[in-house]
Amino acid sequence: MIVACVLVQGYVNYTPDYVSKLRSMVKRHLQREHTFVCLTDQQGVDADRQWSIDTPEDMHPWWAKIHLFNPKLFRPGQVVMYLDLDVLIVKNLLDILHYADGHFTLVPHAGRWKGKGAMKVVPRFNSSCMVWRAEQGYHLYNAWSKGVTRRLWGDQDWIGERMPHAKTFPLEWFPRLSEVVSPPFPEEAKVILTKKPKNHIAAEHWPWFKEAWQ
């Protein structure tokens, strides 16, 4: 099994420390043998395997996640779990893995963002957490071009366009940090999405967050 993340330069200055902390959280909350992989434009990240990718240019940095579906990266049949760097894992990840049950599965859309300018939003999915068998995503990479970034806002919109009937996790498993004041966490919560504030800022404000994010 593969657990993957992506670290590239962009509008948020994520540091390699985010990768280290994500890897540590995965070790605590995934009681299954796995290989931790980081796709990155940097050197020396804390991962079992590092896959070098170019810094996204003339596009939003989240489009780097398209490389997750490169047929050269993961073998057919390999199960891949992807997690954004700005998350806080609070429950056993095996529940997420078992729920996917061999299907391409990701977080359902929840928000009001409608895109900007000519770039459209396809309000189906949130790609903060995804599980799939490697071959299920190959077409997302093979059919993609930079032209897609000029009409769609992000990778999750591309997935929504190409795979409108993909399976989704229960939304309550992925509350946003703004919905979680402090522990005890909602019983259903498994991965908290820390969109605002980002992890390093939240760790400065809340001791409980700092303790969990390590």
Image (cartoon, helix red, strand yellow):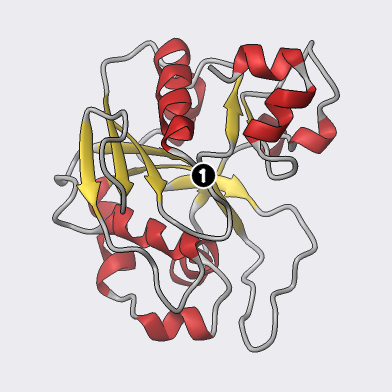
x%, y% of residue 134? 25, 47
Q: Secondary structure at mark 1?
A: loop
From this view, report whether residue 169 is shown above or below residue 212. below
| Image quarter of residue 140 | bottom left
From this view, report whether residue 187 is shown above or below residue 82. above
* Number of numbered discs on residues: 1
The residue drawn where x is 48% and y is 54% is 166
From this view, report whether residue 160 is shown above or below residue 152. above
| Image quarter of residue 120 | bottom right
Q: Residue 69 or 178: which is nearer the viewer? A: 178
The residue drawn where x is 55% and y is 78% is 152
x%, y% of residue 206? 78, 20
Q: Residue 19 or 192: which is nearer the viewer? A: 19
The residue drawn where x is 18% and y is 50% is 73
Q: Would residue 124 be seen by someone viewing this image from the given angle?
A: yes
Q: Residue 60 or 133: which is nearer the viewer? A: 60
Q: Is residue 125 left or right of residue 189?
A: left
x%, y% of residue 175? 73, 34
| Image quarter of residue 43 | top left
Q: Which three-letter amino acid code belongs to the residue tagged 1? A: Tyr
Disc 1 designates what residue? 14
